[in-house]
Amino acid sequence: MVAGDFTLIRDLDVLKDMFTMKLRYVPNAYIYKFRKVLKEGEAFFIKNPNLAKMDEGKFQLTDQMQKLTFTRETTVAPCLDFSGSINGFAFIDYHPIIVGTVPLNISLDVIGLVVAIGERNKMRLQIQDVNGSQLDVNLWGDYCYKLNDYIQKNPNILRIIIILQFAKINLWQGYVNTYYDVSKFIIITDIDEIKVFKKNLNQDGPHENSSSTFSYMKSNRSSDKDDFVLNHELKTIADIFEPIEIKKYVIVATIKGILQHTPWHYPTCTNCNTKAVPKNPSNEPSLTGSLKNETYECRNPKCTKTETLTVPRFMIPVRIQDHTGSMTLTMFEQDAKKLLKIYAKDLVAKTAKLGFCTNAYPSDINVLKDMKLAFIVSVSKYNVQRNTNQYTISRISDDEILIEELEKKFVVAEDAKSMIM
């Protein structure tokens, strides 16, 4: 097919019905009909698509005012001679972002050297361009996990260069944010754009064998000391066994076991990270460990998707005990991952690979048994109204010094009570 036989994106015309396009990247939102044919990163000829108007004012991935839709007449064929940009990056200077002159409803691409890293569950970064300008970036969900994994697997890394494609600006907070699961996040690879950036960076900046170019920012989150010792009341299990007041408390207890009759993970929407539900619920246990074989829907009214892909997250019911009694708490992804050293999605995949039913508890979770921990538990409105004491864990600590300090407070309190009596 010669060059004149296809239409460029800039030449799209709503008045025409018949045209052929030569494309490499197709956003996931437009490919449901051709899901098995179209693959992100591969090139295709798309013949006879239709054009629809983009919703004005809504966030857009490109600056085009028309979007492709597929009809019965649309055909798709592989393109083996694509000569355009592989990734289609359109990097923007930091200055227009910083001063607020960039349109808020259009996605943007940025590249930079990481110079500071903030909290680990919602990761705040500062990146720097070759001119020394710095930009704040927020990573959410799996993007955060991806960078965390990279840092853990490369503990001696001196500098990190990232690309964030299809990002969204938050004008009021002054950040560039990942946009649901649409954004593309790339960490130090051999692609041409990063090679050029590194070359320009080395001309005036630190070299690859120099000292580390990034530091960890001070977190706005309370320290363990503040959160467990100063900010919340220390209680026993007996003290909070009856859910009377909506409040958070600290308890020190030992995990004695895992409840076997309830699920240890649940599916979350990849678009908004809230719980997703099967569109056609089945009582059959999962043998594959793959949640994407079923159709799920997200019922979060703020989510942009109704039918969605899912990722498993931890929801482990742990039975704890102290010297006054025992109760059940629910441990979610962040704390479970900290203790188990693995994400729920990876443990589900590992369990399925071994040929086990993913609804059954894997032996990996047994490492939680007999752990003595400090818990911040949340007594919610739901607990009080339903009179149920299966509380949610807000935060855990396995710091032995902290736990010892909390236990000493119990001894002091008990001694004071004895003296009064």
Image (cartoon, rainbow, N blue to C red):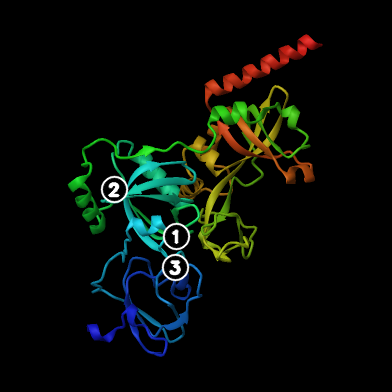
Does residue 104 lie above or below 230 as drawn?
below
Q: Residue furthest left?
A: 203
Badge 2 or badge 3: first in the primary sequence: 3
Point out residue 344 in the picture as x, y percentages from the top left corner. 51, 46
Q: Quadrant of residue 235?
A: top right
Asked which secondary structure carries label 1, the reply is strand
Does residue 306 lie above or below 143 as drawn?
below
Identify the residue position indicated by label 2 in the image: 132
Does any portion of residue 1 appear in the rendered image?
no
Residue 28: image tag: 3
Query: Which one is in front in this view, the residue at disc 2 or the one at disc 3?
Result: 2
Q: Hey, what amino acid is under mark 2?
A: Gly
Density class for disc 3 (Cα within 10 Å; few <14, some 14-19, many ≥20) is few
* Residue occupying image coordinates x 40% and y 75%: 64
Does any portion of residue 281 appear in the rendered image?
yes
Q: Residue furthest right?
A: 421
Q: Quadrant of residue 207?
A: top left
Check whether the beta carbons of the residues at disc 2 and disc 1 lie within 8 A of each other.
no
Residue 180: image tag: none
Total numbered labels placed on residues in the image: 3
Density class for disc 1 (Cα within 10 Å; few <14, some 14-19, many ≥20) is many
Asked which secondary structure carries label 3, the reply is helix
Badge 2 or badge 1: first in the primary sequence: 2
Q: Nearer the viewer, residue 338 or 246?
A: 246
* Residue occupying image coordinates x 46% and y 47%: 346
Identify the residue position indicated by label 1 in the image: 168
